[in-house]
Amino acid sequence: MTEYCLLGLLGHPLSHSLSPTLHEAALQAAGLKGAYRLFDVSPENLQTEFKRMLALDLKGFNVTIPYKQDIYKIISKRTNEAKLTGAVNAVKVEKDGTLTGHNTDLIGFRLALGDAFDINLQGKTALIIGAGGSARAVVVALAQMGMARIRVRARDKGRVSSFIEEMQENLIQTNNDTHSLVNLCADDSIDDKKNRDEIVLVVNASPIGLPGVAAPSWLANFIDSLPDDCLCFDLVYSKDGSKPLFTQLATTRKLSTMDGLSMLIHQASYSFEYWTGISVPVAVMYKALNTVIPSSRPI
Protein backbone atom coordinates (compact mmCIF):
# COMPACT_ATOMS: atom_id res chain seq x y z
CA MET A 1 0.00 0.00 0.00
CA THR A 2 1.38 3.40 -1.03
CA GLU A 3 2.10 5.72 1.87
CA TYR A 4 0.04 8.94 1.89
CA CYS A 5 2.33 11.96 1.66
CA LEU A 6 0.87 14.89 3.56
CA LEU A 7 2.82 18.13 3.20
CA GLY A 8 2.01 21.71 4.18
CA LEU A 9 2.90 25.33 4.75
CA LEU A 10 2.93 27.17 8.08
CA GLY A 11 2.71 30.96 8.07
CA HIS A 12 0.51 34.04 8.25
CA PRO A 13 -1.01 35.38 6.05
CA LEU A 14 -1.26 32.66 3.40
CA SER A 15 -4.07 33.87 1.15
CA HIS A 16 -1.51 34.69 -1.57
CA SER A 17 0.25 31.30 -1.50
CA LEU A 18 0.80 29.28 -4.68
CA SER A 19 2.65 26.50 -2.85
CA PRO A 20 -0.24 23.97 -3.00
CA THR A 21 -0.33 24.29 -6.79
CA LEU A 22 3.41 23.60 -7.05
CA HIS A 23 3.68 20.75 -4.58
CA GLU A 24 0.55 18.91 -5.66
CA ALA A 25 1.92 18.97 -9.23
CA ALA A 26 5.17 17.55 -7.86
CA LEU A 27 3.29 14.81 -5.98
CA GLN A 28 1.50 13.80 -9.16
CA ALA A 29 4.71 13.83 -11.21
CA ALA A 30 6.44 11.70 -8.56
CA GLY A 31 3.58 9.19 -8.52
CA LEU A 32 2.80 9.85 -4.85
CA LYS A 33 -0.63 10.03 -3.27
CA GLY A 34 -0.90 13.02 -1.01
CA ALA A 35 -1.82 16.66 -0.53
CA TYR A 36 -0.31 20.00 0.45
CA ARG A 37 -2.24 21.93 3.10
CA LEU A 38 -2.06 25.53 4.24
CA PHE A 39 -1.78 26.19 7.98
CA ASP A 40 -2.55 29.90 8.35
CA VAL A 41 -1.81 30.48 12.02
CA SER A 42 -1.88 33.79 13.87
CA PRO A 43 1.09 34.45 16.20
CA GLU A 44 -0.90 34.12 19.41
CA ASN A 45 -1.96 30.58 18.39
CA LEU A 46 1.41 29.33 17.12
CA GLN A 47 2.30 26.99 19.99
CA THR A 48 -1.13 25.34 20.11
CA GLU A 49 -1.61 25.02 16.36
CA PHE A 50 1.93 23.77 15.82
CA LYS A 51 1.22 20.82 18.12
CA ARG A 52 -2.01 20.11 16.23
CA MET A 53 -0.11 20.16 12.94
CA LEU A 54 2.35 17.56 14.17
CA ALA A 55 -0.52 15.25 15.14
CA LEU A 56 -1.61 15.06 11.48
CA ASP A 57 1.14 12.65 10.39
CA LEU A 58 2.86 15.17 8.13
CA LYS A 59 5.86 14.05 6.12
CA GLY A 60 7.19 17.59 5.92
CA PHE A 61 6.18 21.22 5.76
CA ASN A 62 7.40 24.62 4.65
CA VAL A 63 7.61 27.65 6.93
CA THR A 64 7.12 31.23 5.76
CA ILE A 65 6.57 34.71 7.21
CA PRO A 66 6.66 35.30 10.14
CA TYR A 67 7.79 31.97 11.64
CA LYS A 68 11.13 30.99 10.05
CA GLN A 69 13.11 31.99 13.13
CA ASP A 70 10.49 30.78 15.61
CA ILE A 71 10.54 27.26 14.18
CA TYR A 72 14.32 27.32 14.05
CA LYS A 73 14.33 27.84 17.81
CA ILE A 74 11.62 25.27 18.52
CA ILE A 75 13.25 22.29 16.81
CA SER A 76 16.56 20.82 17.88
CA LYS A 77 17.91 19.14 14.71
CA ARG A 78 19.10 21.49 11.95
CA THR A 79 20.99 21.14 8.70
CA ASN A 80 24.09 23.21 7.99
CA GLU A 81 22.06 25.53 5.75
CA ALA A 82 19.64 26.18 8.61
CA LYS A 83 22.48 26.85 11.05
CA LEU A 84 24.17 29.28 8.66
CA THR A 85 21.03 31.34 8.21
CA GLY A 86 19.51 30.92 11.66
CA ALA A 87 16.18 30.29 9.95
CA VAL A 88 14.12 27.32 8.75
CA ASN A 89 11.79 27.22 5.76
CA ALA A 90 11.52 23.43 5.33
CA VAL A 91 10.98 20.86 8.09
CA LYS A 92 11.20 17.11 7.65
CA VAL A 93 9.27 14.87 10.02
CA GLU A 94 11.49 11.84 10.58
CA LYS A 95 10.04 8.34 10.98
CA ASP A 96 10.59 8.50 14.74
CA GLY A 97 8.65 11.79 14.90
CA THR A 98 11.65 14.06 15.40
CA LEU A 99 11.91 17.22 13.33
CA THR A 100 14.85 18.35 11.21
CA GLY A 101 14.96 21.97 10.03
CA HIS A 102 16.45 22.92 6.68
CA ASN A 103 16.76 26.10 4.60
CA THR A 104 16.04 25.85 0.87
CA ASP A 105 15.65 29.62 0.52
CA LEU A 106 19.45 29.75 0.31
CA ILE A 107 19.74 27.71 -2.90
CA GLY A 108 16.38 29.03 -4.13
CA PHE A 109 17.58 32.63 -4.00
CA ARG A 110 20.89 31.88 -5.72
CA LEU A 111 19.25 29.99 -8.58
CA ALA A 112 16.51 32.59 -9.04
CA LEU A 113 19.04 35.41 -9.07
CA GLY A 114 20.97 33.58 -11.77
CA ASP A 115 17.77 33.01 -13.77
CA ALA A 116 17.06 36.73 -13.92
CA PHE A 117 20.35 38.60 -13.92
CA ASP A 118 23.75 38.03 -15.50
CA ILE A 119 25.86 39.80 -12.91
CA ASN A 120 29.17 39.29 -11.14
CA LEU A 121 28.67 40.22 -7.50
CA GLN A 122 32.30 39.86 -6.50
CA GLY A 123 33.36 42.94 -4.55
CA LYS A 124 30.04 44.75 -5.07
CA THR A 125 27.45 46.36 -2.74
CA ALA A 126 23.87 45.22 -2.18
CA LEU A 127 21.05 46.54 -0.02
CA ILE A 128 18.46 44.33 1.65
CA ILE A 129 15.09 45.55 2.87
CA GLY A 130 14.01 43.42 5.82
CA ALA A 131 15.61 41.67 8.78
CA GLY A 132 13.58 38.47 9.04
CA GLY A 133 14.04 34.85 8.01
CA SER A 134 14.18 35.45 4.26
CA ALA A 135 16.71 38.26 4.68
CA ARG A 136 18.97 35.84 6.54
CA ALA A 137 19.12 33.47 3.58
CA VAL A 138 19.78 36.37 1.21
CA VAL A 139 22.68 37.66 3.32
CA VAL A 140 24.37 34.25 3.44
CA ALA A 141 23.83 33.64 -0.28
CA LEU A 142 25.26 37.03 -1.26
CA ALA A 143 28.24 36.54 1.03
CA GLN A 144 28.91 33.16 -0.55
CA MET A 145 28.74 34.82 -3.98
CA GLY A 146 31.48 37.29 -3.04
CA MET A 147 29.50 40.41 -2.19
CA ALA A 148 31.80 42.90 -0.44
CA ARG A 149 29.19 45.02 1.36
CA ILE A 150 25.59 44.44 2.36
CA ARG A 151 23.48 47.27 3.74
CA VAL A 152 20.34 46.43 5.70
CA ARG A 153 17.20 48.55 6.03
CA ALA A 154 14.12 47.69 8.11
CA ARG A 155 11.38 49.42 10.05
CA ASP A 156 12.80 48.47 13.46
CA LYS A 157 16.35 49.84 13.84
CA GLY A 158 16.90 47.79 16.98
CA ARG A 159 16.05 44.66 15.04
CA VAL A 160 18.50 45.68 12.32
CA SER A 161 21.28 45.95 14.91
CA SER A 162 20.64 42.50 16.37
CA PHE A 163 20.22 41.05 12.87
CA ILE A 164 23.62 42.41 11.80
CA GLU A 165 25.33 41.18 14.96
CA GLU A 166 23.95 37.66 14.62
CA MET A 167 24.49 37.37 10.87
CA GLN A 168 28.06 38.63 11.16
CA GLU A 169 28.70 35.68 13.47
CA ASN A 170 27.04 33.27 11.01
CA LEU A 171 28.98 34.65 8.05
CA ILE A 172 32.27 33.61 9.61
CA GLN A 173 31.17 30.05 8.86
CA THR A 174 30.74 30.80 5.14
CA ASN A 175 34.24 32.19 4.57
CA ASN A 176 37.51 30.72 5.85
CA ASP A 177 39.30 34.01 5.15
CA THR A 178 37.72 36.23 7.80
CA HIS A 179 39.79 39.19 6.59
CA SER A 180 37.73 39.30 3.39
CA LEU A 181 34.45 38.83 5.20
CA VAL A 182 31.51 40.80 3.81
CA ASN A 183 30.88 44.17 5.46
CA LEU A 184 27.37 44.05 6.92
CA CYS A 185 26.00 47.41 8.04
CA ALA A 186 22.79 49.34 8.67
CA ASP A 187 21.39 51.64 5.99
CA ASP A 188 20.21 54.86 7.61
CA SER A 189 19.87 57.30 4.72
CA ILE A 190 16.50 57.41 2.98
CA ASP A 191 16.83 59.38 -0.25
CA ASP A 192 20.49 60.38 -0.43
CA LYS A 193 21.32 59.51 -4.04
CA LYS A 194 25.04 60.01 -3.51
CA ASN A 195 25.06 57.19 -0.96
CA ARG A 196 23.19 54.91 -3.37
CA ASP A 197 25.57 55.08 -6.35
CA GLU A 198 27.57 52.03 -5.27
CA ILE A 199 24.52 49.73 -4.98
CA VAL A 200 24.20 47.14 -7.77
CA LEU A 201 21.38 45.06 -6.25
CA VAL A 202 18.42 45.71 -3.96
CA VAL A 203 16.49 42.79 -2.49
CA ASN A 204 13.09 43.25 -0.87
CA ALA A 205 13.05 40.50 1.75
CA SER A 206 10.35 42.21 3.82
CA PRO A 207 6.54 41.74 3.84
CA ILE A 208 6.10 44.92 1.76
CA GLY A 209 3.67 43.96 -0.99
CA LEU A 210 1.90 41.17 0.88
CA PRO A 211 -1.88 41.52 1.40
CA GLY A 212 -2.63 44.01 4.15
CA VAL A 213 0.93 45.34 4.44
CA ALA A 214 1.09 49.09 3.80
CA ALA A 215 4.01 50.70 1.98
CA PRO A 216 6.39 52.55 4.32
CA SER A 217 6.52 56.32 3.80
CA TRP A 218 10.17 56.22 2.69
CA LEU A 219 9.80 53.57 -0.03
CA ALA A 220 9.04 55.76 -3.08
CA ASN A 221 11.89 58.19 -2.35
CA PHE A 222 14.20 55.27 -1.68
CA ILE A 223 13.53 53.71 -5.08
CA ASP A 224 13.87 57.10 -6.79
CA SER A 225 17.34 57.41 -5.25
CA LEU A 226 18.67 54.14 -6.73
CA PRO A 227 21.19 54.15 -9.60
CA ASP A 228 19.71 53.66 -13.08
CA ASP A 229 21.57 50.36 -13.54
CA CYS A 230 20.54 48.93 -10.16
CA LEU A 231 18.91 45.48 -10.20
CA CYS A 232 15.83 44.89 -8.03
CA PHE A 233 14.79 41.47 -6.71
CA ASP A 234 11.44 41.38 -4.90
CA LEU A 235 10.96 38.15 -2.92
CA VAL A 236 7.22 38.86 -2.78
CA TYR A 237 4.93 37.56 -5.53
CA SER A 238 1.24 37.98 -6.34
CA LYS A 239 -1.14 35.07 -6.72
CA ASP A 240 -2.87 36.64 -9.73
CA GLY A 241 0.37 37.37 -11.57
CA SER A 242 0.25 41.12 -11.03
CA LYS A 243 3.41 42.91 -9.92
CA PRO A 244 3.79 43.30 -6.15
CA LEU A 245 4.29 46.82 -4.80
CA PHE A 246 8.10 46.98 -4.69
CA THR A 247 8.32 45.52 -8.21
CA GLN A 248 5.75 48.03 -9.46
CA LEU A 249 7.69 51.01 -8.13
CA ALA A 250 11.01 49.71 -9.45
CA THR A 251 9.48 49.06 -12.88
CA THR A 252 8.12 52.61 -12.96
CA ARG A 253 11.72 53.76 -12.47
CA LYS A 254 12.64 51.52 -15.47
CA LEU A 255 14.95 49.46 -13.27
CA SER A 256 15.60 45.80 -14.09
CA THR A 257 13.31 43.82 -11.79
CA MET A 258 12.09 40.37 -10.89
CA ASP A 259 9.49 39.15 -8.41
CA GLY A 260 9.56 36.12 -6.12
CA LEU A 261 7.99 33.46 -8.35
CA SER A 262 11.26 31.98 -9.57
CA MET A 263 12.65 31.72 -6.04
CA LEU A 264 9.36 30.20 -4.88
CA ILE A 265 9.67 27.44 -7.46
CA HIS A 266 13.36 26.69 -6.84
CA GLN A 267 12.98 26.48 -3.07
CA ALA A 268 9.83 24.39 -3.50
CA SER A 269 11.68 21.94 -5.75
CA TYR A 270 14.46 21.48 -3.21
CA SER A 271 11.97 21.25 -0.33
CA PHE A 272 10.07 18.49 -2.11
CA GLU A 273 13.25 16.51 -2.73
CA TYR A 274 14.30 17.02 0.90
CA TRP A 275 11.04 15.49 2.15
CA THR A 276 10.54 12.70 -0.37
CA GLY A 277 13.98 11.91 -1.80
CA ILE A 278 12.50 12.41 -5.28
CA SER A 279 13.73 15.13 -7.63
CA VAL A 280 10.98 16.65 -9.77
CA PRO A 281 12.02 18.91 -12.68
CA VAL A 282 11.25 22.58 -12.07
CA ALA A 283 9.50 22.53 -15.47
CA VAL A 284 6.73 20.53 -13.78
CA MET A 285 6.19 23.33 -11.29
CA TYR A 286 6.42 26.05 -13.93
CA LYS A 287 3.77 24.23 -15.97
CA ALA A 288 1.51 24.02 -12.93
CA LEU A 289 2.07 27.71 -12.24
CA ASN A 290 1.06 28.60 -15.77
CA THR A 291 -2.31 26.93 -15.24
CA VAL A 292 -3.20 29.51 -12.59
CA ILE A 293 -1.18 32.45 -13.90
CA PRO A 294 -1.30 32.16 -17.73
CA SER A 295 2.00 33.00 -19.44
CA SER A 296 3.54 33.85 -16.09
CA ARG A 297 6.84 32.19 -16.91
CA PRO A 298 8.39 30.19 -19.75
CA ILE A 299 8.47 26.43 -19.20
Image: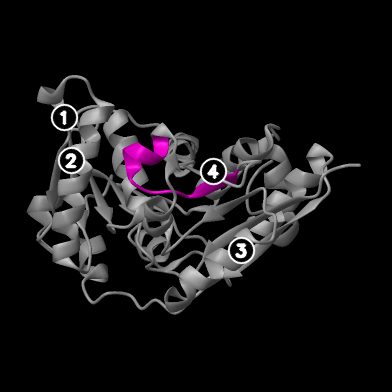
Say which quadrant the C terminus sits in. top right
Where residue 181 is drawn, which disc sits there? 1
Q: CA distance from mark 3 to mark 4?
A: 22 Å
User: Which residue is labeled 4 in the image?
Assistant: 267
Image check: 194 left or right of 162?
left
Q: Residue at horizontal 33%, vertical 75%? A: 215
Q: Secondary structure under badge 3?
A: helix
**Crowd class of label 3 (few under 14; some 14 to 19; many from 20; radius 10 Å):** some
Image check: 286 left or right of 187?
right
Looking at the image, do the residues carrying marks 2 and 1 touch, with CB atoms under 8 Å apart?
A: yes
Q: Earlier in the sequence, mark 1 or mark 4?
A: 1
Image check: 123 left or right of 174?
left
Image check: 29 left or right of 166?
right
Magenta stretch holds residue 196:
no
Q: Residue at horizontal 46%, vertical 66%? A: 244
- Say which amino acid is labelled 2: Gln
Looking at the image, do the residues carrying marks 1 and 4 touch, with CB atoms under 8 Å apart?
A: no
- Say which amino acid is labelled 3: Met
Q: Earlier in the sequence, mark 2 or mark 4?
A: 2
Q: Earlier in the sequence, mark 3 or mark 4?
A: 3
Residue 239 visible? The answer is: no
Specify start and end residues of the magenta stretch as a single range. Answer: 81-93
User: Which residue is labeled 3 in the image?
Assistant: 53
Q: Secondary structure under badge 1?
A: loop
**Crowd class of label 2 (few under 14; some 14 to 19; many from 20; radius 10 Å):** some
Looking at the image, do the residues carrying marks 3 and 1 touch, with CB atoms under 8 Å apart?
A: no
Where residue 168 is drawn, which disc sits there? 2
Viewer-nearest of discs 3 and 2: 3
Q: Secondary structure under badge 4?
A: helix
Q: CA distance from mark 3 to mark 1?
A: 40 Å
Looking at the image, do the residues carrying marks 2 and 4 touch, with CB atoms under 8 Å apart?
A: no
